[in-house]
Image (cartoon, helix red, strand yellow):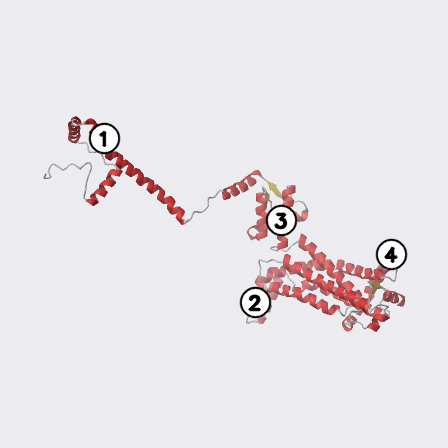
């Protein structure tokens, strides 16, 4: 580690100068030889570096999202040119050039921060040895050696010998307890930062090897930092813990305000936006209007979260416009409510047995009516004959003969009688009115 840190010795002067300037401010408040003054100086150094790295962080976010969007195309290229590695590399570079994506952009913040990290490590190593470094003279070095953070000197390490720790006016137990707690916190913050990125801000609809790699890094990075942490001075642990906390907070803000399309974070954001529009009746904020504008412009390419958002707007009686605003209309709400009511009033699907029973009921009723009609017609001539007596029979025959002479056709038998006749014909017994014979036929 000392060999690597010596490679960045050229930047130790600006790093030591920044620490000294912050120490002057905090030393006037807490005292020049206190751990608060030197510890807060290191924390302020981290904050200053991370503020300067915000543009690189924005490029990292854009690059990460572009890489996620390109994963399906990259996978297709790998499958297509599986046996030709050179052509595969050429097609990958062509894809990066066409989309303006740089795979190394996702590592820019870490790469840009590494020189400051190793320069600080070099400064603290010289403080532990009692040597002047950068703009820090011997008086400042002695003051830093006396600074303790919760009983541990800022230049002490977990693996230091008892003699070296005693030279810094501290106990080995205090040093190891403080460094162990800081290493655990540093690894836990690294794990939580990577986990919230994977669980909330990744498009779950696209399954690619890139996601598997990120998931592996979620478990590998904390272990690496834990192993390396036992060789870091307390001041470096303060630096790395601070930068992890900064990264975690910065990432939480990005996930909350500018989530990846298709992720759980986007769904949560759109639901909050829907609630705000429903409550206020408008889209508040220029950034929110730009989000609605982008979603409207997607058209049929909207993902599931965005379609759910538009469905919620329609139910609430709103319609999104191309400029990012919304309009409220009674017809929109009425159509949404009418569609929901019609959907609720749809009858339940009947089983096969229920459909067969329903189809059999009209047939049974029809057969019952025909039987009743037949019985009534059969009983009617008997009653007539009984009431009119023999005297009516002759008149009836005369009337029938007269109708036949005039050419009137006999009345068409009823449906019940015809059905009954067919049934009786099968049994060989024909009853009821007979069809008159033709005059030329033999009797």
The front one of 421 and 9 is: 421
Circle nearer the N terminus (2, 4): 4
Residue 160 lies, with reference to residue 44, above or below; the image says below
Few, some or many C-alpha atoms within 10 Å of disc 2 (few <14, some 14-19, many ≥20)? some
User: In what element is the residue under mark 4?
Assistant: helix
What mark, if any, has residue 132 been given in the picture? none
Instruction: Point out the residue furthest to the left here.
Output: 442
Q: Residue at x 69, y 65 (%)?
A: 222
Which residue bears the numbered disc 2? 78
Instruction: In this rendered view, identify the residue nearer to me: 109 or 392.
Output: 392
Of mark 3 and mark 4, the one earlier in the sequence is: 4
Q: Secondary structure at mark 3?
A: helix
**Circle 1 sits on which residue?**
383
Relative to 246, say whether 10 is above or below: below
Above-or-below relation of 86 to 321: below
Image quadrant of residue 317? Answer: top right
Q: Kindly identify which residue carries mark 3.
A: 271
Q: CA distance from mark 2 to mark 4?
A: 60 Å
């Amino acid at each position: 580690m000392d060999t690597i840190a010596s490679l960045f010795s050229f930047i130790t002067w600006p790093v030591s100068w920044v620490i000294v300037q912050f120490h002057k401010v905090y030393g006037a408040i807490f005292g020049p030889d206190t751990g608060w003054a030197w510890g807060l100086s290191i924390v302020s150094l981290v904050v200053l570096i991370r503020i300067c790295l915000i543009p690189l962080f924005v490029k990292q976010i854009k690059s990460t999202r572009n890489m996620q969007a390109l994963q399906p195309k990259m996978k297709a290229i790998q499958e297509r040119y599986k046996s030709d590695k050179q052509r595969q590399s050429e097609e990958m570079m062509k894809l990066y050039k066409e989309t303006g994506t740089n795979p190394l952009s996702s590592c820019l913040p870490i790469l840009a921060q590494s020189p400051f990290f190793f320069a600080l490590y070099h400064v603290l190593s010289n403080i532990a040895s009692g040597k002047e470094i950068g703009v820090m003279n011997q008086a400042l070095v002695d003051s830093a050696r006396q600074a303790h953070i919760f009983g541990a000197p800022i230049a002490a390490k977990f693996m230091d010998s008892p003699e070296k720790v005693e030279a810094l006016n501290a106990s080995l137990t205090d040093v190891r307890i403080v460094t162990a707690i800081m290493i655990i916190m540093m690894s836990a913050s690294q794990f939580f930062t990577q986990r919230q990125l994977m669980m909330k801000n990744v498009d779950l609809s696209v399954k690619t090897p890139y996601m598997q790699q990120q998931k592996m890094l979620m478990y590998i990075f904390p272990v690496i930092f834990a192993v390396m942490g036992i060789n870091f001075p307390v001041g470096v642990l303060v630096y790395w813990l601070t930068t992890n906390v900064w990264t975690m907070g910065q990432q939480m803000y990005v996930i909350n305000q500018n989530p990846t399309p298709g992720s759980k974070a986007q769904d949560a954001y759109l639901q909050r936006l829907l609630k705000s529009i429903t409550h206020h009746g408008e889209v508040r904020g220029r950034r929110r209007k730009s989000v609605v504008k982008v979603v409207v412009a997607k058209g049929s390419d909207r993902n599931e979260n965005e379609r759910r958002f538009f469905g919620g707007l329609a139910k609430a009686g709103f319609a999104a416009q191309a400029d990012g605003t919304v309009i409220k209309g009674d017809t929109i709400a009425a159509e949404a409510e009418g569609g929901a009511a019609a959907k609720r009033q749809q009858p339940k699907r009947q089983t096969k047995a229920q459909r067969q029973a329903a189809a059999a009921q009209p047939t049974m009723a029809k057969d019952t009516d025909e039987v009743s009609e037949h019985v009534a017609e059969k009983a009617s001539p008997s009653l007539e004959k009984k009431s009119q007596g023999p005297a009516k029979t002759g008149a009836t025959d005369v009337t029938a003969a007269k109708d036949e002479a005039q050419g009137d056709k006999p009345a068409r038998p009823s449906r019940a009688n015809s059905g009954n006749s067919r049934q009786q014909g099968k049994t060989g017994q024909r009853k009821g009115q007979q069809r008159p014979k033709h005059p030329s036929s033999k009797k």
